Amino acid sequence: MHRAVMLKRAVLALTAILTLALASCGEDREERSAALPAAAPAVQPVYAAYDFGRVEDGVVNLGVQPMWAPTNAITEAMRRDRILAEELSREGLSLRQHGFFKGADLAFFLNQGQVQAGVAGEGVAIGSASAGEVVIPILIHQGTSALIATRPMTVRDLRGQRVGHVPGTSASFGLMRALGSEGLKPGDVTLAPMDITEMPAALEEGRVAAFSSWEPNTTILLNRHRGYTVIHRAEYTGYLFFRRDFVADHPRAARLILAAQLRAMGFMRAGRANLEEAARWGLLAWEEMAQAGAGVSVGQFAALIKSDLLDLSPTPLVLDTDLVETGRLYGVFEMLKAQGTIPSDASWDKVRKSFDKTLLLDVLAAPQVYRLGETLYTPAP
């Protein structure tokens, strides 16, 4: 009990620090919070070409992030899953995947009703849940973000320095946690919002002292820049989730999609050859979206899949302990409020109830019905 009280006080203290710091920086136009699900994404020509079919016409749209590794190995396996296609067809449905550069972009289309399901990090999931829009039944990723610099240093050494980050990402939340762990407020550094592709040049030219990154970017950058060093890592999680109205109208289809994630994880656990095949699928998806070579070997990608996906418990349930007010997800929720990303009066109870494992437990209870022991993949265009 004493430990729980101390943890809760620490979360509340960090929230107060963030709130005061962000308020004091209100006139600094350099930093602007991302309104996670409401703000329209930056103009991306690729999005304009997407054909979002209507559920009424038999199309389920799944938003994915091809440049978010190694989660993209799972979504690429799902894209190739003939069992999923067959089972959905019996429901009069087909699945279309649409790739997004950022979770915040995906959240916008989910909020508009053009996407019925999505794969994104905890910030996007909690932001959407705060509006009561989603059901979050399953964990899909558990990895780390990284603070990268050109020399060994401590987080405390960043006081008074510019730090690059992509607002609204899990890596940005990891940066906030890193600062708080060393007793720093966001106002003790200059937060410099920029795209991940801009960060190496900014670091080399001395425009930032460090920047926050996520995989596979961290591995790519460490491969390309041997002098780079990671000065801090922060845990973050990702989820597969659904619009609440989709689950209400098509509960079996939602369960079939969850079964496809479980099959993909089982396929990759079944042997090294399968793991490397999934790694190649993920790399192809990354390169297609980035329009550039990935800069990560199949072996490195396979290692990321193992550490961030397969080393999770065999059943990727969201634990009840993660949803208490002394837990890490509650800390992310409070950070989102402090940043103005979600309303200051957002309800944690509403968010907590959005994490509902009922669908997943239904699938696990009927492995033969949902064909969890089978795999049938085919190359996808």
Image (tube, rainbow, N blue to C red):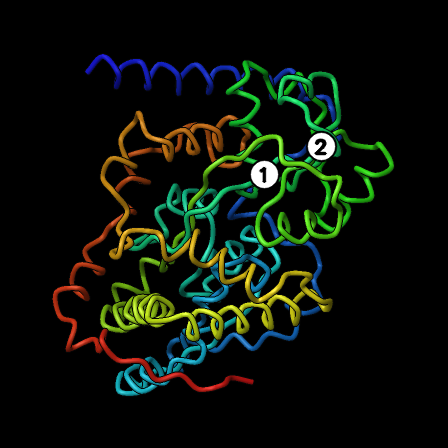
Q: How far apart are marks 2 and 1 (CA)?
A: 10 Å
Looking at the image, residue 66 sits to the left or right of residue 265; the answer is right
Q: Which residue lies furthest to the right in this view?
A: 205
Quadrant in the picture for residue 264: bottom left
Looking at the image, residue 254 sits to the left or right of residue 229; the answer is left
Residue at 32% over, 61% down: 245
Q: Mark 2 points at which residue?
A: 210
Q: State the image coordinates of residue 123 (x, y, percent, origin top left).
A: 47, 42
Q: Is residue 92 above or below residue 1?
A: below
Residue at 21% over, 60% down: 359
Quarter of the image with the N terminus is: top left
Q: State the image coordinates of residue 328 (x, y, percent, origin top left).
A: 37, 32
Q: Who is closer to the viewer here, 161 or 221? A: 221
Quadrant in the picture for residue 87: bottom left
Q: Which of marks 2 and 1 is nearer the N terminus?
A: 1
Residue at 32% over, 33% down: 348
Which secondary structure lies at badge 2? strand
Residue at 37% over, 35% down: 329
Disc 1 marks which amino acid? Ala
Disc 2 marks which amino acid? Ala
Q: State the image coordinates of residue 342 (x, y, percent, origin top left).
A: 48, 36
Q: Name the residue under label 1.
A: 146
Quarter of the image with the C terminus is: bottom right
